[in-house]
Amino acid sequence: MTIANLEKIKCPNGHIFEAQLISAISVSDNFELKEALIAGELNLVTCPECGQMFYAECFILYHDSQNELISFVYPLIFQEQAIQCMAKMQKEFKLALKNFSDKDKITYEPILLFGIENLVLLLREEQDIEDEEAILKHLANDLNLTVVKIVPSIARKLAIPKFMPFDKKNKDFSEKSLFLGLDNFVKHNSNLEHYADFFKRISKNKSMFTEISKALK
Ligand SMILES: [Zn+2]
């Protein structure tokens, strides 16, 4: 559910006016809103008096069920009260969970952010990863790769893509077949910044594979 309210806003020069501000976003029923958010257009207001353009700060609840992302976004000025905000978020999240049926139960933790700009940054970063994932899906057949998805919230926690390229010659989803798949994929295209970084990190930290194998869908 997406919610917008008419709010009183004060511009940096002290002028007061009213504007519609988004306070809850559910991406699953409104993808255009996600695009507007990524473009930095959401809750961006212009003061009718002095013409100044700025982000109007208000609390935003962001939910993308497909990507397992739920974020409580507090205004930037609340950053100094991060501990209180964290406690408030956990309490409200627990209450909200009661409204979900078992089928739609949220099994991932909410993310605490301050300022809409930081939500925009997070979504842009994930968009960049999704662009690389699209290249992987496109090239998988030609490169003899089997693409397997892992749980999105775990991929986010590990800061890695959620689609894994496994080498097709190896029938099982082993560490070796992932290494061969990653090596093949990043060698093929030099613009895969996130996959190249992931390959570098997992080569140094083998325990990462244990977490990935537990998160295979
Ligand atoms: Zn103004």
Image: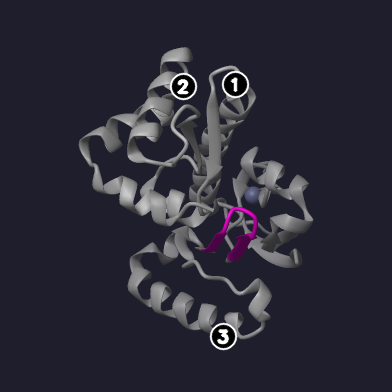
Circles 1 and 2: CB distance less than 8 Å? yes
Lateral position of residue 139 relative to residue 197, left or right: right
Toward the viewer: 162 or 159? 162
Q: Earlier in the sequence, mark 3 or mark 1?
A: 3
User: Which residue: 21% across, 35% down?
Assistant: 204
Residue for badge 1: 139
- Residue type highlighted by circle 3: Leu
Toward the viewer: 208 or 128? 208
Q: How crowded is mark 2: few (under 14 residues within 10 Å), some or many (20 or more)?
A: many
Q: How crowded is mark 3: few (under 14 residues within 10 Å), some or many (20 or more)?
A: few
Task: Give the spatial CA distance, label 3 vs label 2.
Answer: 44 Å
Residue for badge 3: 95
Toward the viewer: 56 or 11? 56
Task: Give the spatial CA distance, label 1 vs label 2.
Answer: 8 Å
Q: In the displayed structure, would residue 65 be above or below residue 129?
A: below
User: Which residue: 39% across, 45% down?
Assistant: 159
The chief SS type of the magenta part is strand
Residue for badge 2: 185
The residue range painted magenta reads 60-72
Q: Is mark 3 on a helix, strand or loop?
A: helix
- Percent position of residue 171, x then y: 47, 36
Q: How many numbered discs, if any?
A: 3
- Residue type highlighted by circle 2: Phe
Q: Is mark 2 on a helix, strand or loop?
A: helix
Toward the viewer: 84 or 158? 158
